[in-house]
Image: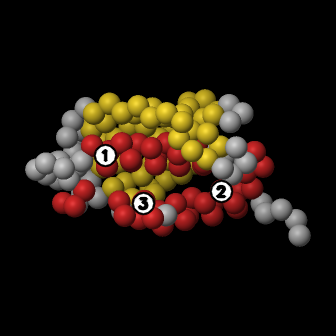
Amino acid sequence: MPPADPAAQIAALIRMFPQIGFQKLLGIEVVETVPDRAVVRLAHRAELCGGGNALHGGVISSLIDLTGALAAWSGHDPARGMKASTVTLTVNYIGAALGEPIRATGVVRRRGKELIFCDVEIVEDTAAARLVATGSMVYRIV
């Protein structure tokens, strides 16, 4: 049996991404993926808040990690391997996410043999698009 089409493998992975346990718990929605870029949306829900009406910092950092990983997968060649993990994650909290959905955009800045360097920006998913957080990560796929 011939190996699966690489583009079809990545497309299947992206389709199932929101259904993975933790992503499903958060309630992420994949808005867009193109090679080396991903956009993810997260509705504001009270159970994701820390104090008051602000999304918990762990939710924000998780969204940075998940969006960067999805951007890394979106331009990946499955022939290079399918085992992956986050190597580093840096989060810069800029402002609280108060009562509005948020949108994260992840972009691959450099793709090496195993390491993929990604930047992520999170904004309120409103017309004002107020900045909530930025982050960078290194993701590894082997």
Point out the frontmost of discs 1 and 2: 1
Left/right placement of residue 80 relative to residue 47 reads right
Q: Residue furthest right?
A: 1
Residue drawn at (65%, 43%) of the image: 141
Query: What is the crowding at mark 2: few (fewer than 14 residues within 10 Å), some, or many (at least 20)?
Result: some
Query: What is the crowding at mark 3: few (fewer than 14 residues within 10 Å), some, or many (at least 20)?
Result: few
Q: Amino acid at mark 1?
A: Gly
Q: Secondary structure at mark 2?
A: helix
Residue 37 position (above or below residue 20): above
Q: Which residue is mark 3?
A: 22
Question: What scheme was used to colour the molecule?
Answer: secondary structure
Residue 37 visible to an observer of this rendering: no
Q: Secondary structure at mark 3?
A: helix
Count of all numbered marks drawn on residues in the image: 3
Tell me which numbered mark, 1 or 3, is placed earlier along the sequence: 3
The CA distance from mark 1 to mark 2 is 27 Å
Q: Which mark is residue 76?
A: none
Tell me which numbered mark, 1 or 2, is placed earlier along the sequence: 2
Left/right placement of residue 17 relative to residue 75 reads left
Q: Which mark is residue 10?
A: 2
The CA distance from mark 3 to mark 2 is 20 Å
